[in-house]
Image: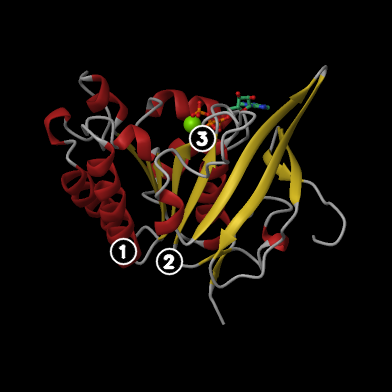
């Protein structure tokens, strides 16, 4: 039996045999504003508060300050968890922008090499006994790399290190907006989905006056998962996946 790390996201765990496979790496992919960061944070927050699994969120896009205040809207008091050493935000956004960080956990601007980042992050994770980890996002982590070969190598490295880390992880990646005749892509560089043990696609469809968010489990190793596209909402409690026939 594959051990599970329940996401605690209402409606999702029923679609994936109870949760993500434990100690594996999941890719959460979607265009901008589809909910990748909120999804990942909900996984960490629930890990700490429902499963006694401390978590680390590595941010390369948004500042930790903004994240803390945005997440409070969902009732997730990250600062409180940080105070109890059950949760840590690692600021990679300042380093990326080349500005100093006032955060307790921050990456240094001249040390954004992937191996270095991973060493620092695993050190922080070890200190709080983290069982869950999020890297938000892979393209932002690889921003200083020159070409796609280097980026692919970096992604492979991230995946190897996470696999050995003994943590259940999520990495996020951007997806180009779907366009007419191009083949569907599941990740920015076309390799992330192969090295990840699972891929969750988030989408935002707008049809005239209507807009709908959808979630689709593209793959999940060792898991009999829903093959349907599920609508979801972002409510005052975070993501809420809705039922469709057959599953959940
Ligand atoms: N409190 C809230 N209530 C309802 N919806 C919200 C709330 N906060 C954010 N949202 C919705 O979630 C979206 C942002 O979600 P999130 O930051 O997780 O997206 P993302 O996929 O990480 O985007 P990006 O690629 O830009 O990082 C917002 O554009 C908005 O539509
Ligand atoms: Mg985001």
Q: Residue furthest bottom?
A: 1
Instruction: Say if mark 2 contacts mark 1, CB within 8 Å.
Output: yes
Residue 180, picture quadrant:
top right
Indicate left or right for 190 with 103 as reference. right
- Check disc 3 and report its element: helix, strand or loop: loop
The residue tagged 3 is 175
Between disc 3 and disc 1, the foreground one is 3
Q: Quadrant of the C terminus?
A: bottom right
Instruction: Say if mark 3 contacts mark 1, CB within 8 Å.
Output: no
Quick one: label 3 or label 1, which is nearer the N terminus? 1
Queried on whether the Cβ of the residue with tag 1 lies below 8 angstroms from ligand 2, the answer reads: no
**Residue 110 at least partly seen:** yes
Quick one: label 3 or label 2, which is nearer the N terminus? 2
Query: What's the distance in space between the residues labelled 2 and 1, CA to CA?
Result: 8 Å
Residue nearest the viewer, comparing 229 with 181:
181
**Residue 59 at least partly seen:** no
The residue tagged 2 is 23
x, y percentage for residue 80? Answer: 46, 40
Q: Residue at x 23, y 27 (%)?
A: 95
Q: Residue at x 79, y 47 (%)?
A: 242
Residue nearest the viewer, comparing 216 with 109:
216
Q: Residue at x 25, y 54 (%)?
A: 157
The residue tagged 1 is 165
Q: Quadrant of the N terminus?
A: bottom right
Quick one: label 2 or label 1, which is nearer the N terminus? 2
Query: What's the distance in space between the residues labelled 3 and 2, CA to CA?
Result: 25 Å
């Amino acid at each position: 039996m594959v051990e599970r790390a329940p996401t605690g996201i209402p409606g999702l765990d029923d679609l994936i045999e109870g949760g993500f496979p434990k100690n594996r790496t999941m890719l959460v992919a979607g265009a901008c504003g589809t909910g990748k960061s909120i999804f990942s944070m909900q996984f960490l927050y629930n890990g700490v508060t429902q499963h006694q699994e401390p978590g680390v969120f590595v941010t390369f896009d948004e500042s930790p300050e903004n994240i803390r205040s945005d997440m409070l809207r969902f009732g997730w008091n990250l600062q409180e968890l940080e105070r109890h050493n059950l949760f840590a935000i690692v600021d990679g956004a300042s380093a990326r922008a080349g500005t100093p960080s006032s955060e307790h956990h921050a990456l240094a601007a001249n040390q954004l090499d992937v191996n270095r980042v991973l060493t620092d992050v695993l050190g922080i994770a070890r200190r709080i006994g983290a069982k869950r980890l999020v890297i938000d996002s892979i393209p932002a982590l690889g921003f200083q790399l020159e070409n796609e070969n280097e980026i692919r190598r970096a992604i492979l490295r991230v995946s190897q290190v996470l696999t050995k880390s003994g943590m259940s992880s999520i990495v996020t990646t951007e997806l180009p907006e779907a366009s007419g005749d191009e083949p569907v892509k599941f990740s920015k560089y076309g390799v992330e989905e192969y090295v990840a043990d699972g891929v969750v696609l988030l989408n935002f469809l707008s049809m005239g006056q209507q807009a709908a968010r959808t979630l689709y489990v593209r793959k999940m190793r060792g898991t009999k998962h829903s093959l349907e596209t599920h609508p979801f909402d972002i409510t005052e409690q975070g993501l809420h996946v809705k039922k469709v026939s057959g599953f959940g």
